[in-house]
């Protein structure tokens, strides 16, 4: 269960980082691409968004299973201790701690990916606002020039 969860968290982080890369490429290329190129990059962003969402759902499923496995292992350790199998109890508790450390590390990577994604979303909002203002400014400028020509 631990390996499945850590792998799922790693896959989620990779999907988020790929989405960020395509999103940044798209944002840096705004106004510099053909409509076909723009649509292609937008599609890549949508695909990676869907992939990340799918991986996140997978993480939630595996996390639930992992939590149940940890709880069962803790009960087994208590039962082993109560029955006099102290070494077995210590071994199970040690394995639980190792598993928890591995999952915590994978969760940190996932949280870092989420943080970078949030930063990218802020960048996207700013860049889209700038691009929209640029387009509106161009339209305004064209209207003003047309108005001046009529005089």
Image (tube, rainbow, N blue to C red):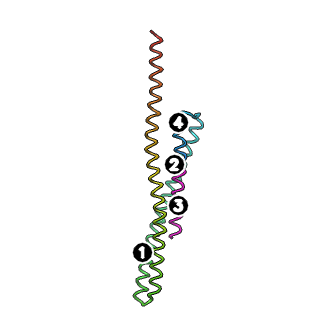
Question: Distance between the Cα atoms at labels 4 and 1?
Answer: 50 Å
Query: In the rendered structure, which disc, 4 or 1, sits on the residue that comes first in sequence?
Result: 4
Instruction: Tell me the mark number nearer the camera, choosing from 3 and 1.
Output: 3
Q: Residue furthest bottom?
A: 84
Residue at image position (48%, 73%) is 98
Query: In the rendered structure, which disc, 3 or 1, sits on the residue that comes first in sequence?
Result: 3
Look at the picture and state if 127 lies above or below 76: above
The residue beneath circle 4 is 30
Question: Distance between the Cα atoms at labels 2 and 4?
Answer: 15 Å
The numbered disc on residue 10 is 3
**Main SS class of the magenta portion in the image:** helix
Residue 71, picture quadrant: bottom left
Look at the picture and state if 112 lies above or below 132: below
Percent position of residue 151, x then y: 44, 9
Residue 76, picture quadrant: bottom left
Question: Distance between the Cα atoms at labels 1 and 2?
Answer: 36 Å
Query: In the rendered structure, which disc, 2 or 4, sits on the residue that comes first in sequence?
Result: 2
Mark 3, residues whose alpha carbon is within 10 Å: few (<14), some, or many (≥20)?
many
Magenta stretch: give its range: 1-18
Q: Is residue 96 magenta?
A: no
Query: In the rendered structure, which disc, 3 or 2, sits on the residue that comes first in sequence?
Result: 3
Instruction: Tell me the mark number nearer the camera, choosing from 4 and 1.
Output: 4
Query: In the rendered structure, which disc, 1 or 2, sits on the residue that comes first in sequence?
Result: 2
Q: Are marks 1 and 2 in contact (CB under 8 Å)?
A: no
Residue at image position (48%, 59%) is 109
Query: In the rendered structure, which disc, 3 or 4, sits on the residue that comes first in sequence?
Result: 3
The residue beneath circle 2 is 20
Q: Secondary structure at mark 2?
A: helix
């Amino acid at each position: 269960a631990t390996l499945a969860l850590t792998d799922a968290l790693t896959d989620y982080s990779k999907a988020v980082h790929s989405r960020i890369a395509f999103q940044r490429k798209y944002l840096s290329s705004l106004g510099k691409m053909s409509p076909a190129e723009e649509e292609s990059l937008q599609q890549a962003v949508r695909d990676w968004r869907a992939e990340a969402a799918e991986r996140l759902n997978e993480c939630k499923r595996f996390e639930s299973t992992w939590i149940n496995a940890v709880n069962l292992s803790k009960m087994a350790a208590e039962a082993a201790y109560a029955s006099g199998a102290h070494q077995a109890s210590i071994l199970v508790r040690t394995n639980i701690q190792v598993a928890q450390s591995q999952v915590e590390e994978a969760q940190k990577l996932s949280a870092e990916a989420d943080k970078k994604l949030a930063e990218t979303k802020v960048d996207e909002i700013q860049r889209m606002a700038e691009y929209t203002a640029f387009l509106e400014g161009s339209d305004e400028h064209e209207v003003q020039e047309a108005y001046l020509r009529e005089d």
